[in-house]
Image (cartoon, rainbow, N blue to C red):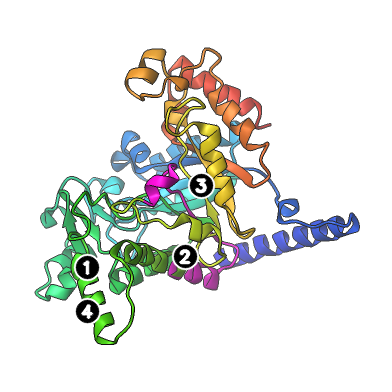
Amino acid sequence: MKRIIKKSKLGLSILLGLVLIISSLSCGTYSKAATKEKEVRAVWFSYLDILEAKMNQMNEKQFTTYFRGVCSKLSGQNYNTIYVQVRPYGDAMYPSKYFPWSVYAAGQQGKDPGYDPLQIMIEQANSYGLSVHAWINPYRVSSGSTSLSKLSKDNPARMWKSSSNKSTQRNVLSYGGSLYYNPASEEVRDLITNGVKEIVSNYDVDGIIFDDYFYPNLGSNYKKNFDYTEYKAYVADAKEENKGYKTIVNWRRDNVNKLLKQIHTAIHKIDSSIEFGISPAGNMSNLYAANNYYSDVKKWMASDEYIDYITPQIYWSFSHSVCPYKSTVNTWVSAKKSDDVDLYISLAGYRAGVSKTTAKNTLFDSGWYSKDKNILQRQVEYNRTIDQISGFSIFRYSSFKSTSYGVKKELKNLSAILN
């Protein structure tokens, strides 16, 4: 049934595209922008939302009812897309042959909740006309702990890390009190790719999206830590073969590039209608720091080989001292070189409607305070003045159930221009 649904969607899109092409040709012009069916209006549904909803105490019927309410609320406010987090920590919110059940599904990693949350989320979202993108954190295994006993016995990270083979152990790295899959490992890339292929083969998703967590911040000793062992081996091999070699910074960027290219190719081989996107941190200069991220976004946005869309997290106000909204957006617009990559802007719903004191002392961004409670509205209106921007996303769903007058007013003002 899934593949039939996918094909019918694709067929309809092709038919609509042909109609638009013929129409535009009759006017003497044609552009990708002319084929866009609608502005993307997405909302991030995080594992934190799942945690706050106490999903691990719900049965199938209760979760279905809960998520139906989520979709009803978003659809009622004129949103059309939801990014549902299905792999926050190398785990899964669906039955997987590669990753263990998430602790957020049933309260214990590896424990089956007795139903398929991802399937329910897709069915409910589609019934309200919402597109679904499965949101994955590719490398993160644990946060604030390196204890293998906290991972389920079937967790590949635990099995690799506890292996007697030192090379296999290196597939999982301990750093800063947390565990990460090693970006330099081909086995890791294959595992993450297989997990993505499993989703797009078994579920009627419209897209796959990775968030901004790639390499962690490696500090001042970045040249000698984390995956330095693999870099040394790479350099030694290059010297032995009398070949040139990359700096450790460029080598790390290339490790991420290899993963994205592999994922993009795998998805499109299964179903070319499924999109692959990235949501990087919003300050582009930070992405090119020597010790952090290693996200070559300019390369991704200049090519058709890595991603189909990008939605940078521009979570600042119009008057932020370092990254004011308009100039930061313009930096991303200027960097987008390929017509095959769509640009959406991710906005900070969680910052909207705050008090003057909170904006100044907690967010360190006084511009987030507005008497008119219309910052999100004005940000979207600014985006609409730029042809290269095709939509936006709101982080995160918790804002839509806030009881704060300021938050509700911000979202109401935004919803008013989404009709």
Can the viewer see residue 393? Answer: no
Tell me the quarter of the image containing the N terminus: bottom right
Residue under label 1, please give it. 171
Find residue 101 and report its image quarter.
bottom left
Q: Residues within 10 Å of mark 2 (few under 14, many from 20)?
A: few
Residue under label 4, please give it. 236
Could you tell me the amino acid type at mark 3? Thr
Cβ–Cβ below 8 Å for labels 4 and 1? no
Residue 9 in the figure: left or right of residue 44:
right
Could you tell me the amino acid type at mark 2? Asn
Q: Where is residue 138 in the image (x, y as percent from the top left)?
A: 34, 58
Indicate the secondary structure of the residue bearing disc 4.
helix
- Residue 268 on the magenta span: yes
For the residue pair 55 and 364, the one nearer the viewer reads as: 364
Q: Which of marks 4 and 1 is nearer the N terminus?
A: 1
- Residue 214 on the magenta span: no
Q: Which of marks 3 and 2 is nearer the N terminus?
A: 2
Q: Distance between the residues labelled 4 and 2?
A: 42 Å
Q: Which residue is drawn at 33% across and 50% down?
A: 88
Residue under label 3, please give it. 311
Residue span colored magenta: 262-288
